[in-house]
Image (cartoon, rainbow, N blue to C red):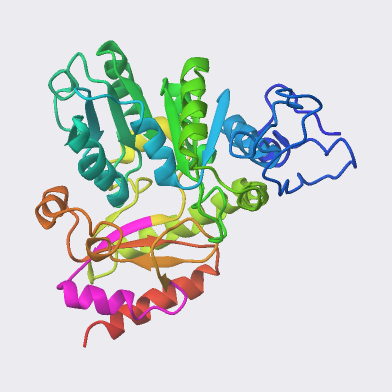
């Protein structure tokens, strides 16, 4: 039976953390515990804490423990979607609280804070925390600071150490959405974040066949609150989804290495393309986020955003012309995806807000998969040609 040693690498933890052989049969893979309830030896006595599957499921526990280990965290709590994970943290807020978020976030996160949480009496401000005095942006009494780094879809990087330190001095908790970087390339708990969250739908699962989310924390008290919310609200993933995500995690380190190789190559190629106005990729020395990325990330994956020269009609034609890049929302799977944020993932963000952020109508987001690089470049090149007419 594999037993993790102190300092075990990320690849080893992805395969073994939280996943000892099943004790009854010795099954190497964590079984799918497809049950809604558990027999009790006497009233109110639960074996291993298992009484009802909304509260606890062994397959889910294995997934939570594995992801927590990858992030260097003590506790993991899984949810039925990434937004379910966001919502669980938001449910800790009370009327009169203030949330400060980075200005560039996933459209669904923006919608949840502005359309659901703010009408309940919570102030939600979206601020470019790279270009403002933090004392002004995050005043004393702020309850929560919300960060994506890198962001969706502009791949902006925030200085986690500086912002987290200031937020804590102001009395705020800090949540970092680490979906794009994954724990392979960045671990925000190391900078003092109170929560790290992922849409496990994306890179952690990596095969576009599961929807899920997770929150990781080192705080026993915050973990207890999250578990109470999880059990009370019931936004829990099913055991089969947890099993599939666990299976995906076993190749995370291998997949991310390939995503980065191809993502970097595509980004460098696009920089020199005459029909591209600008490229967003934090590992490019020309990218304004390069220095921050070098400071806190050991690499990056396959997310590349670029602005196509031309109007919205040309951009729509471009994303509709690719063959290997599938026109679809989501990201992080082994297959390459392409989308137009202005009318897809960020359509819920008002046009004036998109314009202020720099989400142009011609901004195209790529999730570069693990297909052969030459085929992906050829596919994009033929889309440049097809969209000219």
Q: In this view, does 153 lie to the left or right of 245?
A: left
Task: Give me the residue at 85% from left, 45% from top.
Answer: 27
Residue 22 figure quarter: top right
Most extreme residue toward the front is 43
Residue 336 visible in the picture: yes
Name the quadrant of the N terminus: top right
Task: Give me the residue at 54% from left, 38% from top.
Answer: 78
Instruction: Give the x, y percent position of residue 378.
Output: 43, 77
The answer to whether 10 is drawn above or below residue 311 in the figure is above
Residue 350 figure quarter: bottom left
Most extreme residue toward the right is 25
Q: In this view, does 385 lie to the left or right of 89?
A: left
Instruction: Give the x, y percent position of residue 273.
Output: 28, 68
The answer to whether 267 is drawn above or below residue 174 in the figure is below
Task: Give me the residue at 44% from left, 58% from top.
Answer: 331
Magenta extent? 304-325
- Residue 140 magenta-drawn? no
Q: In this view, does 274 lie to the left or right of 61?
A: left
Question: In terms of depth relative to the viewer, which is nearer, 56 or 252?
Answer: 56
Instruction: Give the x, y percent position of residue 220.
Output: 53, 16
Name the quadrant of the C terminus: bottom left
Most extreme residue toward the bottom is 389
Instruction: Give the x, y percent position of residue 322.
Output: 39, 78
Question: In terms of depth relative to the viewer, which is nearer, 108 or 15?
Answer: 108
Q: Is residue 254 left or right of residue 362?
A: right
Question: In terms of depth relative to the viewer, which is nearer, 257 or 349?
Answer: 349
Question: In terms of depth relative to the viewer, which is nearer, 119 or 10?
Answer: 119
């Amino acid at each position: 039976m594999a037993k993790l040693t102190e300092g075990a690498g990320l690849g080893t933890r992805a395969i073994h953390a939280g996943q000892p052989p099943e004790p009854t049969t010795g099954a190497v893979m964590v079984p799918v515990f497809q049950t809604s309830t558990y027999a009790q030896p006497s009233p109110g006595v639960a074996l291993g804490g298992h009484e009802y599957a909304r509260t606890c499921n062994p397959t889910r526990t294995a997934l939570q423990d594995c992801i927590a280990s990858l992030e260097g965290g003590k506790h993991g709590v899984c949810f039925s979607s990434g937004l379910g994970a966001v919502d669980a943290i938001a449910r800790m807020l009370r009327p009169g609280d203030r949330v400060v978020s980075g200005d560039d976030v996933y459209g669904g996160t923006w919608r949840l804070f502005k359309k659901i949480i703010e009408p309940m009496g919570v102030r939600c401000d979206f601020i470019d925390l790279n270009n403002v005095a933090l004392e002004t942006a995050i005043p004393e009494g702020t309850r929560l600071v919300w960060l994506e780094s890198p962001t969706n879809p502009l791949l902006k990087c925030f200085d986690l150490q500086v912002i987290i330190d200031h937020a804590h001095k102001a009395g705020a908790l800090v949540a970092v959405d680490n979906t794009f970087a994954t724990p392979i390339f960045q671990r925000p708990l190391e900078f003092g974040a109170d929560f790290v969250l992922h849409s496990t739908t994306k890179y952690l699962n990596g095969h576009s066949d599961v929807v899920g989310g997770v929150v990781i924390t080192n705080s026993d008290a915050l973990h207890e609150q999250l578990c109470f919310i999880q059990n009370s609200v019931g936004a829990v993933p099913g055991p089969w989804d947890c099993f599939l995500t666990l299976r995906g995690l076993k190749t995370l380190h291998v997949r991310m290495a390939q995503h980065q190789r191809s993502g970097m190559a595509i980004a460098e190629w696009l920089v020199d393309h005459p029909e591209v106005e600008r490229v967003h990729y934090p590992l490019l020395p020309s990218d304004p986020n390069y220095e921050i990325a070098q400071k806190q990330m050991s690499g990056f994956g396959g997310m590349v955003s670029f602005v196509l020269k031309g109007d919205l009609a040309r951009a729509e034609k471009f994303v509709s012309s690719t063959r290997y890049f599938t026109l679809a929302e989501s990201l992080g799977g082994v297959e390459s995806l392409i989308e137009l944020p202005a009318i897809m993932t960020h359509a819920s963000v008002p046009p004036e807000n998109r314009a202020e952020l720099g989400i142009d109508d011609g901004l195209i987001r790529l999730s570069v998969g693990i297909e052969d690089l030459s085929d992906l470049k050829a596919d994009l090149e033929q889309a440049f040609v097809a969209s000219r007419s």
